[in-house]
Amino acid sequence: MIQWFFHTWERRLASVTTDRVVRPFEWGLDWLTPNGHGHLPPADQLQGWVDDVMRDTSAFFDVAPTRDYEFKDGTLRFPSPLVTPHASNNTVVARWFPGSGDRAVVVLPQWNSDREGHVGLSRLLARAGVSALRLSLPYHDDRMPPELHRADYIVSSNVARTVQVCRQAVLDTRRAVAWLALQGYTRIGILGTSLGSCLAMLTAAHEPLIRAQALNHVSPYFADVVWRGLSTTHVRAGLDGHIDLDRLRDLWRPISPFSYLDRIRGTRTLLVYARYDLSFPVELSRMLVDEFRRRGLPHEVAVLPCGHYSTGSAPFKYLDGYVLTRFLRANL
């Protein structure tokens, strides 16, 4: 009965959004860097590029430093290290919520978060003494080009673009971490929710300044969430008939947390999942938890008694905020 209640509630909350668009399938070869595989069919070109990326992900997620930070009226702006065809997306926007002491976190909200998403959580962290830099993800709010109503270009049926824009989010986050270090913060963490949790772990795996990560709604594989999740049925509709799950999982290895578990051995981790989640299927979350345990990676686990969308409703949002804040205070 409890499961039926939450699943019904989750489907109702998901149905509120009526502007989801099924976009055509694309391999996205125009988003690739040259890799010497141009003579092959599109799927094989993309496979060769992914194989090249996975041989050296440190290079793939490497970021050049910048001095072009602009801070005014509580908002930080700086150029994205990855230049996309959309000018509005190439400037990173982050809101600053100062706490006390030398602890700070970068906060990565969920997919399609608006300008106010995770602002309340950031204020809670600041009140708890942990300064928070709330980042707008690529193609979200101020970074969204006029032709979009949703952040479709970061998760879509364009395979290579999805990889590259998620990579952009990681590079942006690393520059945000560098700004925190320039301000004198020595205990730096990261907090991500849903899509943000995936991007947070990718960042922590490649950014040595991050000491702790709080991952809110988790999965080992990017592709499986898109393929099976309630929130991404329209993306799955664009993929159907063009690619199967095994191939998609392989091509999205560069943005899947499972690929980087051995790189976070020294990072303190909180894994949060919701017992009745239909967007991040629960068995995927438990699979990641089991893998942390099997590998002996230092971690804590919190299970919320709700679903994915209902995490944002009272009283569950207060429980979630408490769990995330307590962990970051204790581990930074």
Image (cartoon, rainbow, N blue to C red):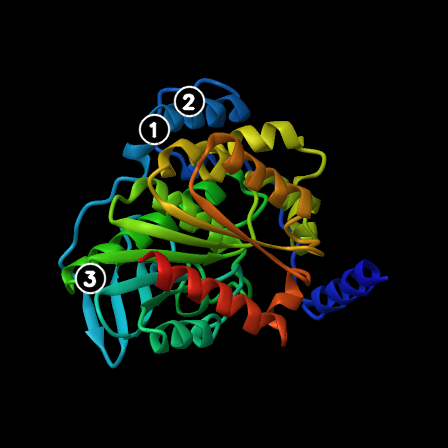
Q: Along the line of sight, which residue is nearer the eye, 200 or 18?
A: 200
Q: Amino acid at mark 3?
A: Tyr
The residue that appears at 43% across and 65% down in the rendered structure is 326
| Labels 3 and 2: the sequence-earlier one | 2
The answer to which quarter of the image holds residue 9 is bottom right
Count neighbours of disc 2 (C-alpha within 10 A) and say few if under 14, some if 14 to 19, many if 20 or more.
few
Mark 1 and mark 2: Cα distance apart in space: 8 Å
Q: Is residue 166 above or below residue 185?
A: above
Q: Which mark is residue 315?
A: none
Pointer 1 and pointer 3: residues touching (CB < 8 Å)? no
Label 1 secondary element: loop
Q: Which residue is mark 2?
A: 38
Q: Nearer the viewer, mark 3 or mark 2?
A: 3
- Residue at point 67%, 33% (across, down): 242
The image quadrant where one finds the N terminus is bottom right
Which residue is disc 1 drawn over?
Answer: 34
> Is 71 on the left-hand or right-hand side of 118?
left
**Amino acid residing under circle 2:** Gly
- In the picture of the structure, the residue carrying the numbered disc 3 is 185
Q: Are marks 1 and 2 in contact (CB under 8 Å)?
A: yes
Type of residue at label 1? Pro
- Is 77 drawn above or below residue 195 in the view shown? below
The image quadrant where one finds the C terminus is bottom left
Mark 3, other Cα within 10 Å: few <14 / some 14–19 / many ≥20: some
Query: Residue 63, how many percent across, how many down?
Result: 24, 44
